[in-house]
Structure formats: C-alpha cells, structure tokens
Image (cartoon, rainbow, N blue to C red):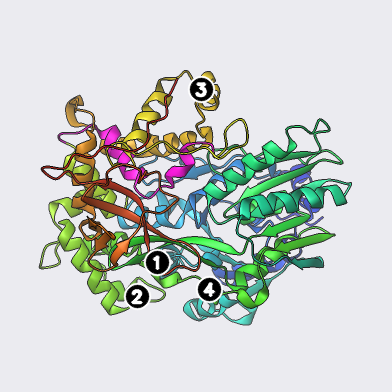
Amino acid sequence: LKATCSGLLPDAELSVEVGRLRRASPVYSSKSKLLESLAKRQVALLVTSPGSGKSLETVSYLKDLGGRVLSIQPSDLAAEYCSRYAATIHGLGSAECWLLPSQQISLEGSVVFTTARCFLYEFLRCGTSLASFQCIVADELQEDTVYQNIMLAVLRKHFVSHAKLVLCTSALETCFPIRNFFCLGDHDVVACGLKFPVDVISMGSHKNLAAECVGIALEFSKQQELGGNILVFLPSFADAFLADAILEQRISDDTDGQVCREVLFSGTPFSLETPPVGTWKVVFAVHCPDVCVSMIKAQCVIDCGIVETIVSKSGVLIKQQCLISREEAERRRSMAGVSCRGTCYRLYNDSALASGPPRDAEDFRFLEDVVLRLQNRQMPISDCFLREPPKEVLKDVQITLERLGAVGPDCRITELGLKLCQTSLEPRLGALIIKASDEVSALDLILLALLTFEDLMLTHVPLDRNGSPRPPPAADKGCMFSRVIDLYKDWLDVPKKAKDSWCQMNGLNAAFFKNLHARVVRHQAEFETPGGKKQAEIEVEQIGHMLREAFPESVLSYMESGFKQQMLGSKLKVSPRSTFSTQGQIPSMVVCPMFSTPLGSKKPQLLNFAAISVEGDDYTPGMKSLSIS
C-alpha cells in the first residue's frame, strides 16, 4: 500500500489503509483523485450516492494531509451523529461537536463537526476559531438551506486562499450552480457511488401512516430470514414516536425477540451494533443524515412520501405537510441500494409526487436572523448569497426587524439588535428572552423560546399501557407552554438514574426531555443573570403578552365561526395536533407563533398558541390536567 500519511509510522499507515479497505466505502475508490485535485487547486466537488460514507471518510483522508479539519453539516442532528461515530473510524479518533459559537472547542482537536448556522455565526462575530482549520468540508449540500447558501459565499470569498475545500453533495441538480459559483472545471469534480438494484413496490396512499408503516415492516421481516435494518421515513417526530409505540405494542407478545426498534432522534442514543442474525431492527426517522445511512445499510426502506416544513408568509410561521419531490424520492430509494437485496416500499404513487417543497418559503423563515447579523457587520446582502432573495421578501424582513425593535427606521442596529447578535437564537426568540429578563427567570424564558416552535405532542408517549391513544393534557388557561415548562422542572428534580422510570410512570417521552435539556444547557450561558439576581418564575398570564411582543403578526381574535387573523382570514380552527382542548370556554384573543397545514389543505390551523388575557375574560379549560406522580 502506498503511504499517504507523512506524519505516521509505516505500521500505523498500513493499519489505517487496511481499515479503509475493510469498510469498503465507495468514496475510497476516489481517494487518490480527490487528493490530487486538492493538490492542484484548493477546491474540489465530491458527488456521491446516498450512504457512501463520505461524511467520515472524506474527513479521514483530509486528516492525512496534516492540520485541523472542520466538517460543516446541515443540521445539529447530522453534526452530533458524525462526532459520535468518528471514534469508529480507525485513524480518525474522537472528534468534537461544535453547535454554538459561545461553546469552547479545544485548539488541539484535529477534527471538529459543526453546522452551517454555527459557522456563519462564528464568522460574523469575527471569532478566531475558524482561522486554525487547514481543511474544510461542506457536507450534504443537497439540503440547500439558507445557511448553506451564505456559507458557500463566505467560503469562496474568505477561505479559498488559505484552506482546502471539499464540497460534497449527493444530488446532481445542486452541482451546476456550485460549479459555476466556484468556477470549477470537469477535472475539479470527483464522482463516485455504488448502487445495488432496488425493488420498488408502490402501495398507494394511506391515511394512518404510522400503523401502515409498522404493518409493512413486520410483514417484510417475516418474509426475510437473515435479518438486518429497516429504515422508515415519517413526516414528523410525533409520527415516528407513534409508530415506535405501535410497534412496541405489536411485538410485546412475541417472545422470539426477532424485531427491535429505534427512533433516529437526538435525544436517544442510536446503537451502532448490527442486529444478530435473524433479527430485524426497525429505525424510524424524519431525516437520515448520510453518516447514519452508511451505518444502517438498510435492506428495506419504507417511504411515506410526505415531508413537514416550516414556511414563513409575511412573518407568520406555518408548519405544513407536502409531498416529497421526485429527487428526494429517488434519494430515499437509493438508500435501500447501499446493500444488496434492497427493497423500497412507497406509500404513494409516482404520479402524485410534487415538484418539491417550497424551498424559498422555507428559507425565508431564517432571513430575519441572517439579515440582522449581516447588517450588524455592515455587509451588503448582494455579496453574501449564492442566490439573493427577492427584494419584496427582504423588504418584509426589514419591516419585521423594525417592528421587533432590532433595527431603527434608518436601518441601523439598535441596542436590542446588538444583544440579539450576541446570542445564537433567532431574533424573535432572542427578543422574547431579553425583553423580559429583568423580571422573569432566565430558565423559564429559555424554555418558552425553545418550545415556541416545538411539536408539543412529543412531551407524552402517544399510547397508554393498553395500546389506546393517550389524550394530551389540556392547556393551562389557554396556554400551550406553561404545563411543559412545569413538567421539565419536575423532570429536572428527579435523580438522573430515575428519570427514565419517572417518565415511564407518568407517560412522558424521556427522549424529548433529554433533548430539551441539552438545548437549554447550551443557551443558559448566553442569558446568565448579572450579579446572580433571582427573578420570579413565569406566570401563565404573562406568556401570551410576551409572545405578542415577539409575534405581533400572529395575534388572532375569536368569533363564533372560529379565529380570525388579518392575513390568513377568518374561520380558522384549532389543529387536532394541538394540545389545546376546545371542550371548554375559548379565549377571546390568542397569539399563535406556529400554525399548521395538513396535507391537501390550504387553510392553516392553530397549533402552538397562548391566550392573551383581556379584562373580563374568564377562561376555564374543559379538560382536567394529567396528574403527575
């Protein structure tokens, strides 16, 4: 074997290369070409198939060159799993996961995984941490998020001159704009991949997705005797945990133990161990990063065909379900081709596939965050985007930031805007905390901010011990959030070793609270109370007024025919996925930071909201709260 690692002993080099050969990653076939391309020019575009293992293998090859390596992932989930699995790659060793600019990372660590969002925050605050990396990998560019959009512009303008860049994608449609943007020729593009034939079985559309997916997974496991992994895609984590609960109920009477299950969620530890021969592991996922695809090597993929995105319409945030694009359907099919004998079940017909989710509308949600930070650094927007947003959208963003108090009428950053740029939350959520930080506990405010866009159905397990749907507890005085805040505090008081048992006893989702706790800990350092001043806990009546300050466009009044909002219209109903009970008296005025639109519906429904107390209102919930032991 040819030595490529000048800093290692020959025996160590040989051991590393043997490990790469044993992993048999498709990327290994293009290793020499990739390194040669980087030697001639600082930038290379790597195009691979899903499950190629590029997320870790590419970092391993760049580490051979010496120096530090930064891998930029599209999401927290992808960065967390990459750093977790890095230790399994011989010669790569442990890696750090960097999710917040305020987080201290070791200057001696050779490999760091971060997100496009964290990368942008660190760059705009003029931090020195980025200057120490000699190699940078921009991974999963097919996700095409607004933060990746700006990240590419920053890399081209500020990093090409002194760092080697590897741009990775698994979608051909993203190659052409990237090639043009970086002026790459054919010799700068490295393509590799391995696809086994996949049997595609279309099942038609289904209403009860979770139950149907579980039924298909069990039927497939009975037909195949060898065992392996089954990857199931569902629209939301609420659907994923519901399917997990249904499967647990279905196999509870099976003493053979031939089927096990997991949810690909950052609050749950995912097992790397291959199931024993004859055992099938069913993995429920909403998104599956490439590093997980390469580890799972699914023999069967069950695709529901629906994705859930959060879009922004003139400042109103709507969580909507839509059909996946043909490109995404093909990528999911390819995930069953990582290993031989692959099968892909589709719970939709090919003719029903959409041209794609409203990617621009989804990106507009984060424009408020991006524009504010760019204005703080006095950077022209036209120079910072791979694709500049429409002018009318930028105008709406400017109006929203002025209304929030982050910028003045002269487009200059205010004192509040400067404080918001020092945090890692979106402007609305950061303002929610900062404006009330003198009166209310920082912990309560951070929890409220993090729960604003959260799927609150995740707080409880969906089924009781008898397998019946568990009704969520009613909102406290018309507020979705106060009860979850109290539950988190109760969970926090439980000893660490007893938390899972406590959650099980009270019907709570342990994974949700672990994930929420990890996010709270990350942000607490950003909002520490000066001098240790002790503030009061948040009151239920305060929440609606606080949210109205951050989401003035989302105030609704109640009429006999339903809720009414200026832009969305009248006769708006409460979503069945909301934890609010309409059995009692309904508040006359609410603020709704998050709406939802089911698949096939055009009219939004109220999802996460809180009552705004009005003089004379006497709201009483119509459902008793769940008692917590």
Q: Which residue is located at x 31 percent, y 44 percent?
A: 449
Q: Earlier in the sequence, mark 1 or mark 4?
A: 4
Q: Amino acid at mark 2?
A: Pro
Answer with left or right where residue 563 lies relative to residue 359.
left
* C-alpha separation, residue under disc 4 versus residue under disc 2: 18 Å
Secondary-structure class at tag 2: loop
**Numbered label attached to residue 363:** 1
In the picture, residue 263 is in which quadrant?
Answer: top right
Determine whether, in the image, residue 524 is placed left or right of residue 95.
left
Q: Which residue is mark 3?
A: 502
**Which residue has dot 4 on it?**
356
Which badge, 2 or 3, is on the more N-terminal residue?
Answer: 2
Q: In the image, which is nearer the foreground, mark 1 or mark 4?
A: 4
Residue 460 within the magenta-colored segment of the rendering:
yes
Q: Quadrant of residue 161?
A: bottom left
Q: In the image, what residue type sits under mark 3? A: Trp
Q: Is residue 209 magenta?
A: no
Residue at the right extreme of this rendering: 225
Q: Are marks 2 and 1 in contact (CB under 8 Å)?
A: yes
**SS assignment at label 3:** helix
